[in-house]
Image: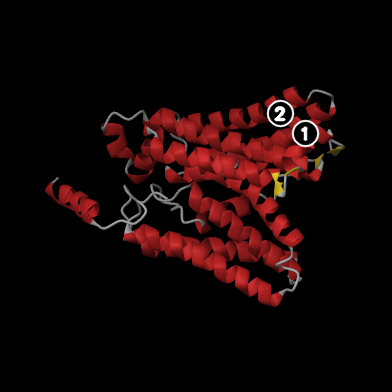
């Protein structure tokens, strides 16, 4: 106990800037430096990169990726993982698009969000109350959601959604795309949740030391259910934006979304071991990833190589977390 108090006092005594410890500040600054270098490099390699239309395309691509990754971030902060987010996105998008094109946009949106929330609640109950490892529970849900989407769609493709609905994915407010406004609004709300509420502080505590959190009287089970429910809900929210932007929905909608979501979380500095990171870093990670994918497309990189690059990004990010993670206080390392 004496040693623990000494470490805690040492952590409190460390100088902070902008509310971050020196180690955590280094992680944040390193991401911003990487983002800057990436922009400069792509500007040199491709004359089309710094055009207004291309930059708008980058941020619009980053917005739904962030929405999907933000919910996943909450799960990862508790030292869990949600492998079902891509499949849930696909299922929710198909359900919503079907009802919206059927003439009831409100019901379609509610049903799509409800499907994602239901999947998340099942994941949370399995992990928290049944004791199923998050990898197994969400992997099973991935196949269930994917199978339900195939049964629901029967091989059909839905297209031609109402113009009013499409505003959330393809509309603008002045010069700013609506998905970008949705992204920053969601970022602000989740940042306040994580850093200004007991619930948010509890999420970090569970990821840092679940046994201590439980012994302190924290409702660990309910909070775990909450983060998985939020992950499912955010996946369905991302589905609405994707469907509105593409003006179509089919069973393949979320098949290639899982790997980029995990990459954005890792690249944003959220530790896969729990307790460290946050949605701000995930937003930066999503933007970096969107720039990487956009740059590879501009440079004509083969699609198969692009998947390899995403895998490489995850490995490097986890390796960096292994090195830096030992020096970052798990209790005070939120960004």
Looking at the rendered structure, the secondary structure element under dot 2 is helix
Residue, disc 1 = 165
Q: Quadrant of residue 245?
A: top right
> Could you say where residue 83 lies in the image, as x and y percent from the top left?
57, 45
Question: Outermost residue toward the front?
Answer: 174
- Of residues 146 and 274, the one drawn nearer to the viewer in this rendering: 274
Q: Is residue 33 left or right of residue 40?
A: left
Q: Is residue 207 above or below residue 149?
A: below
- Of residues 288 and 39, the one drawn nearer to the viewer in this rendering: 39
Mark closest to the chain's N terminus, 1 or 2: 2
Looking at the rendered structure, the secondary structure element under dot 1 is helix
- Of residues 325 and 38, the one drawn nearer to the viewer in this rendering: 38
Can see residue 74?
yes
> Could you say where residue 221 lies in the image, as x and y percent from the top left?
40, 29
Marks 1 and 2 close (CB-CB < 8 Å):
yes
Q: Quadrant of residue 251?
A: top right
Q: Quadrant of residue 229?
A: top right
What is the number of callouts on the image?
2
Coloration mode: secondary structure
Instruction: Give the alpha-carbon distance from disc 1 to disc 2, as whole Å.
Output: 9 Å
Residue appearing at x 65%, y 36% in the figure: 236
> Could you say where residue 58 lies in the image, as x and y percent from the top left?
69, 57
> Could you say where residue 61 lies in the image, as x and y percent from the top left?
69, 52
Q: Is residue 199 left or right of residue 70?
A: left
Q: Quadrant of the N terminus?
A: top left
Residue, disc 2 = 109
Question: Outermost residue toward the bottom?
Answer: 44
Closer mark to the observer between disc 1 and disc 2: 1
For mark 2, does the 10 Å Cα neighbourhood hold few (<14), some (14 to 19), or many (20 or more) residues?
A: many
For mark 1, does the 10 Å Cα neighbourhood hold few (<14), some (14 to 19), or many (20 or more) residues?
A: many
Can see residue 151?
no
């Amino acid at each position: 106990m004496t040693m623990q108090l000494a470490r805690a006092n040492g952590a409190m005594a460390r100088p902070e800037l902008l509310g971050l410890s020196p180690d955590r500040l280094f992680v944040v600054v390193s991401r911003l430096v990487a983002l800057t270098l990436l922009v400069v490099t792509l500007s040199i390699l491709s004359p089309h990169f710094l055009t207004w239309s291309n930059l708008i395309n980058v941020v619009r691509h980053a917005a739904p990726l962030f929405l999907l990754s933000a919910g996943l971030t909450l799960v990862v902060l508790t030292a869990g993982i949600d492998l079902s987010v891509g499949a849930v996105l696909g299922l929710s998008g198909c359900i919503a698009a079907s009802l919206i094109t059927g003439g009831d946009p409100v019901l379609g949106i509610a049903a799509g969000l409800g499907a994602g929330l239901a999947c998340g609640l099942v994941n949370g109950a399995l992990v928290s109350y049944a004791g199923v490892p998050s990898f197994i529970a969400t992997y099973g849900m991935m196949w269930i959601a994917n199978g339900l989407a195939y049964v629901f769609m029967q091989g059909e493709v839905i297209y031609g959604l109402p113009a009013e609905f499409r505003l959330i994915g393809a509309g603008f407010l002045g010069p700013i795309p609506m998905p970008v406004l949705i992204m920053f609004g969601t970022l602000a709300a989740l940042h306040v949740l994580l850093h200004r509420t007991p619930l948010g502080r509890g999420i970090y505590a569970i990821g840092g030391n679940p046994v201590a959190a439980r012994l302190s009287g924290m409702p660990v089970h309910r909070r775990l259910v909450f983060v998985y429910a939020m992950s499912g809900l955010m996946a369905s929210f991302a589905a609405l934006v994707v469907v509105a932007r593409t003006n179509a929905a089919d069973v393949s909608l979320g098949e290639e979304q899982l790997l980029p979501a995990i990459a954005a979380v890792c690249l944003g500095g959220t530790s896969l071991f729990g307790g460290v990171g946050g949605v701000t870093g995930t937003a930066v990670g999503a933007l970096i990833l969107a720039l990487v994918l956009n740059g590879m497309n501009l440079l004509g990189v083969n699609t198969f190589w692009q998947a390899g690059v995403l895998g490489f990004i995850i490995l490097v990010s986890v390796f960096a977390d292994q090195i830096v993670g030992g020096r970052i206080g798990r209790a005070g390392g939120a960004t």
